[in-house]
Structure formats: C-alpha cells, structure tokens
Image: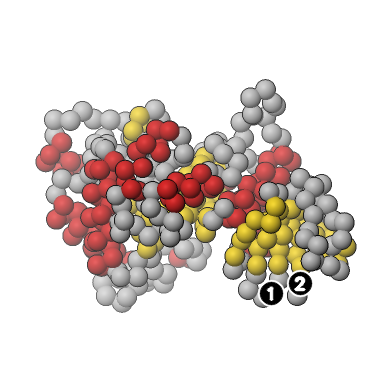
Amino acid sequence: MRWQADRLAVVGTIWPFVDWDQATCHGSDPEIQPVLWELPTKLFAPCDDAAFVAWLADVVERYDGDGIDDMPGLAYPIRHWEVANEPAMQGGHGHFFQGTSLDYLAMLRLAFDAITAADPAAVILTGGQAGMQVEFANFWRPVLESGTGAFHIGNIHSIGSDRSFFSNDYRGFLDESGHADKTFWITEALVPTMPEPGQRPPGADELARITLTGFATALADGASRVFNVGPHDPTGGPGPESDEAFELLARTVSNFDSASWVTGTSVRFDMPDGRSVYALWDDAGLPASVTGTVETLLYDGTTGNAAAAGLSADAPMLVTVRP
C-alpha cells in the first residue's frame, strides 16, 4: 500500500455505516446528502451492535501488527483510530452522521471497547469536532461531559476558521468538561485565507507568516499533533509559501519535548538534544537569560546569526539557542 511505501503513520477513521444494517432499523427514515460521495445516504449509529463489534474487531486485528491475521505484507501497524468524523455536521454542506449527541456517545463507547479489546495498545480519538462554533460545541458538550473512559485523545478541526485552529478554546472546552488530563490533536488544520471584515484577503507572504505563528501557537496551547491540510485542501490551500513555512517549522521542532508560552508572542520549544528553539513574532525578543550568538531562521527560510541581546522579531522567526 502507498502509505506503507511512504512510511506514513496512519490514523484510521471508522465509518460504521452500511446499507443493509441501516435498513434494519432506519428503513423508513429519509435519505440525506452525505458530505463524501463514498458514504451511504443514511448515517445513523449501527443497528446491529454485535455485527458492528465483530467487524471492528476484524478491522483492528488486520492492521494491529501482532502477527495474527494481519494484512499480508503489513510493515507499519495502525494504532490510532478516530471514531467517525465530524458527527455534528448534520446539514449545510451535508451530513457525516445522523443522530443525537447521546447516539454518538453510545457508538463511541462501543467502538472504544471493541478496539481496545482487539488491540490493548490502540489509541482512540473522538471523531473530529468541526470547530468551536456554537452548534458544534452544543453537540459535543454532552459527549465530553459523559464520555469518561470512552476515548484517549480529543480531536478538533479548523478549516480556515481560526488562525490557531481553536487550540486555546478547545483546551478550555476539554478542561471544563472533565478532561483536563487529556491531550488533543488538531487533525484538520488550514490557515484562514478569507479576509477579516473590512480587510483585504491575505497575500502569499502574509499567509506564510500566519502559518508559522498559528502552528506554533497551537502547539504552545497544548496540541500534541497538528495535521496541516495545506495543499490537500480541494481549493488548493493557502499556497506554496504557506506550505514551506509549515515545513520549516516541522523540520525545526517536530520532535520537541515540550512547548510553552514565554510571552503572548513568543513560544519556547525544548528539544531532546538540549537546544531551545524560540518562535518569535510581533517584535518579541529573547529572555534576558539567553546570551551570546543565536541562530535565526525567518518564516521565508532566510537563515542568519544574531546577538541574543536586543534581538527583535520584526518578522516571524525561529531562533535556536544551543547549550
């Protein structure tokens, strides 16, 4: 498979919908327009729980890499599973799910138990909250408040809606709903390309700048993984300059041990080899404790060296401080 040839880690999304099952308890319900053409036109939680659990156990067993009934040639197991996708998306652009918060929660619990029984090392994500807009928060609040023991990692999306992908708001949402101990991933992140009210649309250079600051902000807010939609967006995404700024950040701090705020416009990444990398913007400088010469890397890839004292980030940059 291509993902193995490319040595990609995979988050498997569980689509628990099949026509024959839906017909058994939702045969008289109206059909809907799914967001994805691959999905059926009825998207309720499974009618036959036992069949769903048996199917899910087989799927997980095929990809868990334990040497028992694995996919032929499997080299990299799938250990992360997302249960459905954006279940609160029920109208507008189409449907990903039909049902209430509690319907989804029951399905999530069933899936969690089935997946972890088949693979105790598996990690379960919620099905991607489509943003922090009121209608999405209202759907997810009952799921989170009653969802103790039903997932390992929270999951938020932001496609052009927020410059830091709702990272701060979602961290607070998890905390308030009883999951302060849970980390979260942003499995769909796309920087906004539409103009602010009364402003012009951001150009390529501005999109590159907000890409570096937005992703650094999300990591400092506690996101442990951020998936850049970038060029994979059907509209073409924010462009190559933005993609390059993301790659620059990824290459520089992808294996950080910790990320923390220093000021409102500066983030510190502590690296395994003892280095510290600071993301700076809006004229932020380095802490007074940093002295000597440091390495600078601008959002556009320009490299240089500078004295730590008096350094001011008049453009977004990464500054490496070696031990």
Taking the spot 46% from the left edge, 58% from the top edge, the residue there is 183
Identify the amino acid type marked 2: Arg
Residue 120 appears anywhere in the view: yes
Q: What element carries label 2?
A: loop
Identify the amino acid type marked 1: Gly
Residue 62 appears anywhere in the view: no
The quarter of the picture where residue 307 lies is: bottom right
- In the orientation shown, which residue stands out farthest toward the top? 198
Figure colour scheme: secondary structure
Q: Circle 2 sits on which residue?
A: 322
Q: Residue 174: image x %, image y %?
A: 43, 50
Q: Residue 305: image x %, image y %?
A: 86, 63
Q: Circle 1 sits on which residue?
A: 274
The reply, left or right, for residue 280 in relation to residue 231 is right
The quarter of the picture where residue 160 lies is: top right
Between the residue at mark 2 and the residue at mark 1, the CA separation in whole angstroms equals 7 Å
Q: Dividing the image into 4 quarters, which one contains the C terminus?
A: bottom right
Q: Give the answer, above or below, for where 207 lies relative to 113.
A: above
